[in-house]
């Protein structure tokens, strides 16, 4: 028995102890990340949930934002997200198409890639300054939903470029070659083969962009979002493009830092709605991704 | 070539209408334009922010601006724009945040990439994505309402809104980036390296420590740098959680103020075209430059990985 080549020597035992220690320490590090997330969500739910009702969502804030609901802020956020998306999704997807389908491996492509990375790294407050300088003042749009949406659109462009590029790169080269071989042009190939086959990845990027856009505060503070705006209740078209608007993120900032004597659960409820919306959208993107991945044909 | 074959070549090809060909040209032009748009936007951001701040550049004594702690932009008699304390504020909160975030982020990346499989791995990745999705304003609110109270209660701090509060929030916000980029870096190490290490009798941890860390060094460095970039640029969370006092911190319980928070807090109250307004845009240029350099370094590090 003791002559077995698999005797546990002190060295092996030490290695195994270290392995176990590493596993525990690393696991604890992951837990240190996951637990705050759960704690935050649980705390917000516990504090804010009692206030949330359909009425809370669909009535305007009243009495200096201390009473009433969050409708005007919710609608403002929807406007900002939809318009920002309408601008940045086409530009972002086409940019990714260029990078993945047209660009050669040369200096221009390298600079574009570098620009995308840097665009993603520009601080949100600098985007705000840019939006103010370029859209509000230089272009003369004024502080408005349009100016704020354009600022958000540029800010979230890298998200959509990166995810679309990844989705396009995942389409096998043989698909394109087959299409070229039957005489299709480059664009015909992209339109009829590449884009349909990468739709899930593109969609994931678009959805992620929605969640990113909805949560931003700094870029809209000086370009179109206001502390308070009275809008007509009960209609989806209460804002126009040149109006300033309220937004959920801005509303949370206002209620926590500017409004005195706000009822205690109110900011928790706003934070919960914002967080809930963002996480729900994210969950949707994960579901779309896994659904379409399971349906993949190659 | 036989006669029939040349005939074949001369026959008109299946014709597409001129409109279709023209349309395709236009679309391809559009694609090229969108392709270079990212460059245009990055330059545009720099130029427009600089344009608003530029008239003030010549009027300032720059050594004083960069190294003085006296930020009194609205003083009646003696306006002073010293951003020294703001720079120190930004660096200290970023530095402290990275002290937490880099080890935890890399550790979590190793756990996700090397020590977990299947369902656990998928779940962890989703949780990290969720963590990344929490808006900064919500973090700021957490800092203001929850962390504030916790710090006052359990730590010997006179105020709850301070350097430590902001740093913990920033750490939680930048960890997801570090994890996802770090995991990519580890994934990029060929499996043959792992197999070779295992064949030599190395444990998983030994493989990680002796083989994967050296091999993925650049990618892990890039992950840390991108985390730094994220932390420097963060605005709303630090605005709400750090106490917003112009101050060179002497301990982690001192309140501070960052470059980003200063812009966010003061821009709304300045008149367009005033010196104070232009100074805030110049701070924007400074922030842009800092993050640009950090991102450039991260990109160079990643490129190092690809070359391998």
Image (cartoon, coloured by chain):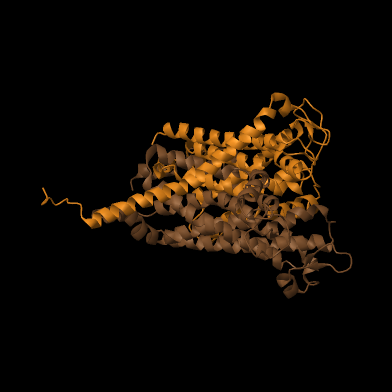
Chain colours: A orange, B brown
Q: Quadrant of residue B119?
A: top left
Q: Nearer the viewer, residue A82 or B74?
A: B74
Above or below: residue A113 compared with residue A81:
below
- A13 vs A154, nearest the viewer: A13
State whether residue A223 is above or below residue A71. Answer: below
x, y percent for residue B89: 66, 62
In the rendered view, tell whether residue A188 sits above or below residue A235. Answer: below
Residue A174 visible? The answer is: yes
Splitting the image into 4 quarters, where does residue B137 fall? top right
| In the depicted structure, whether residue B156 falls above or below residue B135 | below
Residue B128 image point, x, y percent: 51, 44
Residue B239 shown left or right of residue B195 in the figure: right
Residue lying at 67% horizontally and 42% vertically, measured from the top left: A84
Residue B293 horizontal side relative to residue A143, left or right: left
Residue A277 in sight: no
In-image side of B269 versus A289 (left or right)? right
**Residue sitting nearer the eye, A232 or A250:** A250
| Residue A220 coordinates in the image, percent (x, y) | 73, 46
Please give the name of the residue rendered at 75% of the width and 40% of the height, measured from the top-left corner: A255
């Amino acid at each position: 028995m003791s002559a077995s080549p698999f005797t546990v020597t002190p060295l092996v035992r030490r290695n195994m102890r270290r392995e176990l220690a590493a596993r525990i320490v690393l696991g604890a590090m992951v837990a240190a990340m996951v637990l705050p997330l759960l704690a935050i969500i649980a705390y917000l739910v516990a504090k804010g949930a009692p206030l949330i009702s359909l009425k809370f969502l669909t009535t305007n804030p009243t009495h200096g934002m201390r009473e009433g609901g969050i409708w005007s802020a919710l609608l403002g956020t929807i406007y900002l997200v939809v318009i920002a998306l309408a601008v940045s999704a086409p530009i972002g997807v086409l940019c990714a198409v260029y990078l993945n389908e047209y660009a050669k491996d040369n200096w221009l492509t390298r600079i574009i890639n570098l620009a995308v990375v840097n665009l993603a790294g520009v601080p949100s407050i600098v985007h705000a300054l840019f939006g103010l300088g370029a859209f509000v003042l230089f272009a003369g749009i004024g502080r408005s939903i349009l100016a704020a949406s354009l600022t958000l659109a540029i800010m979230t462009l890298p998200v959509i470029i990166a995810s679309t590029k990844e989705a396009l790169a995942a389409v096998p080269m043989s698909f394109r070659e087959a299409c070229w071989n039957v005489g299709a042009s480059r664009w015909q190939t992209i339109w009829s083969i590449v884009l349909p086959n990468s739709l899930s990845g593109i969609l994931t990027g678009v959805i992620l962009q929605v969640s990113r856009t909805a949560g931003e505060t700094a870029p809209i503070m000086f370009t179109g979002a206001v502390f308070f705006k009275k809008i007509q209740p009960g209609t989806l078209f209460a804002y126009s493009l040149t109006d300033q608007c309220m937004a959920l993120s801005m509303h949370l900032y206002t209620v926590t830092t500017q409004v005195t004597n706000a009822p205690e659960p109110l900011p928790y409820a706003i934070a919960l709605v914002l967080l809930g919306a963002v996480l729900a959208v994210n969950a949707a993107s994960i579901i779309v991704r896994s659904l379409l991945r399971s349906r993949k044909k190659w | 070539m036989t006669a029939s074959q040349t005939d074949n070549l001369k026959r008109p090809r299946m014709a597409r209408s001129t409109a279709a060909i023209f349309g395709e040209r236009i679309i391809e032009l559009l694609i090229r334009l969108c392709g270079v748009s990212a460059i245009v936007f990055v330059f545009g951001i720099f130029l427009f922010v600089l344009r608003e701040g530029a008239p003030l550049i010549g009027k300032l004594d720059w050594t004083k601006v960069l190294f003085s702690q006296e930020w009194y932009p609205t003083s009646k008699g003696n306006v002073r724009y010293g951003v020294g304390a703001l720079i120190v504020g930004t660096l200290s909160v970023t530095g402290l945040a990275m002290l937490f975030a880099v080890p935890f982020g890399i550790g979590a990346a190793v756990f996700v990439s090397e020590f977990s499989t299947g369902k656990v791995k998928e779940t962890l990745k989703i949780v990290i994505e969720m963590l990344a999705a929490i808006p900064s304003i919500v973090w700021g609110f957490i800092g203001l309402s929850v962390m504030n109270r916790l710090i006052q209660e359990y730590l010997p701090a006179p105020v709850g809104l301070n350097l430590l509060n902001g740093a913990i929030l920033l750490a939680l916000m930048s960890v997801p980036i570090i994890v996802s980029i770090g995991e990519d870096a580890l994934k990029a190490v060929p499996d043959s390296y792992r197999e070779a290490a295992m064949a030599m009798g190395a444990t998983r941890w030994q493989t990680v420590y002796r083989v994967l860390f050296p091999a993925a060094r650049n990618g892990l460095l890039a992950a840390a740098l991108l985390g730094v970039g994220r932390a420097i640029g963060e605005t709303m969370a630090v605005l709400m959680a750090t106490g917003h006092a112009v101050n060179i911190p002497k301990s982690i319980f001192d309140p501070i103020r960052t470059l980003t928070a200063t812009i966010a807090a003061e821009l709304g109250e300045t008149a367009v075209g005033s010196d104070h307004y232009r100074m805030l845009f110049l701070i924007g240029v400074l922030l842009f430059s800092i993050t640009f350099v950090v991102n450039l370094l991260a990109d160079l590090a990643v490129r190092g990985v690809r070359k391998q």
